[in-house]
Image (cartoon, rainbow, N blue to C red):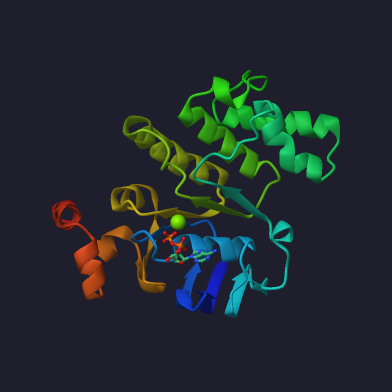
Amino acid sequence: MYVEMKNIYKTFDGFHASDNVNFGIEKGQLAALLGPSGSGKTTILRMIAGLDVPDSGDILINGMRVNNLPGSKRGIGFVFQNYALFRYMTVADNIAFGLKIQKKSKAEIKERVDELLELIAMPGLGKRFPHQLSGGQRQRVAFARALAPNPQLLLLDEPFAAIDAKVRRELRTWLRDMIQRVGITSIFVTHDQEEAMEVANTIIITNQGRVEQIGAPEEICRNPETEFVSDFIDSKYLEAMKWRNG
Ligand SMILES: Nc1ncnc2c1ncn2[C@@H]1O[C@H](COP(=O)(O)OP(=O)(O)O)[C@@H](O)[C@H]1O
Ligand SMILES: [Mg+2]
């Protein structure tokens, strides 16, 4: 397992945001944390990133307990829901941000930025500012910025939420292909089951701070293990899966 959450508890003022969370994700997987709003998805992501500390339990990355390791040393890239690009920086400077912190040379930075602009299909747009981009382009820049320092784990919190429906569809497919191409272990948060089904190869279903089920999309559709999961997963996906699997 590349990422492991073991017996994780986290409370906010007595409220159980994580209530004995356990799961593991293998290297190279693209996992979705799927659940209703308030079910504890973002809390899990923030603890993996080192932005929040669990009350108890262990977080392991690549077999190492990271509870006491600062987020910046965990080899993680983070993409937020609202792009969070630096408005007064060009696209190239946004992408270069993590590399400058790492004190890479100018030449190295330029090479990496050009490579990433190519990867996100925006070559030559490095001099633009965020407001000169479409929502989809901005989110691709956020993705490039997260990938620039070569993280081993990519975390994305509702990365498509602020983007309109049509572009969101395209961006989903794009992201899935891109993550496969880069081969990076990734976890993304969503409350949209269609998005999880379409993008992820593992789905972790959260409810009231607990993990209800973890499995491949087909498996979760075919064999919902709890009442919550069978209620939450829309029957239209069950039908589609039955049809798909004969
Ligand atoms: N910093 C915080 N302070 C107080 N309560 C919080 C904090 N962060 C999260 N919570 C609470 O924990 C619960 C889970 O939140 P969150 O992990 O953001 O859920 P999700 O991402 O699934 O919508 C929510 O009820 C939320 O109000
Ligand atoms: Mg959230």
Q: Nearer the viewer, residue 187 or 189?
A: 189
* Residue at the spot 37% in from the left edge and 72% down from the top edge: 208
- Residue 15 appears left or right of 109: left
Does any portion of residue 101 appear in the rendered image? yes
Q: How many labels sit on residues?
A: 0
Please state the horizontal and vertical placement of residue 200, each as a whole percent of the image: 39, 53
* Residue at the spot 29% in from the left edge and 49% down from the top edge: 194
Q: Nearer the viewer, residue 171 or 158?
A: 158
Please state the horizontal and vertical placement of residue 11, each as a whole percent of the image: 51, 76
Does any portion of residue 26 appear in the rendered image? no
Q: Indicate the quadrant containing the N terminus: top left, top right, bottom left or bottom right.
A: bottom right
- Residue 49 appears left or right of 93: left
Q: Nearer the viewer, residue 17 or 217?
A: 17
Which corner quadrant of the figure contains ligand 2? bottom left
Residue 9, compared with residue 136, is above or below; it is: below
* Residue at the spot 50% in from the left edge and 40% down from the top edge: 178
Q: Residue furthest front?
A: 13
Q: Indicate the quadrant containing the C terminus: top left, top right, bottom left or bottom right.
A: bottom left
Q: Quadrant of residue 209?
A: bottom left
Please state the horizontal and vertical placement of residue 31, each as a whole percent of the image: 44, 58
- Residue 35 appears left or right of 147: left
Residue 145, compared with residue 126, is above or below; it is: below
Please state the horizontal and vertical placement of residue 126, each as a whole percent of the image: 66, 23
* Residue at the spot 62% in from the left edge and 44% down from the top edge: 146
Residue 174, compared with residue 224, is above or below; it is: above
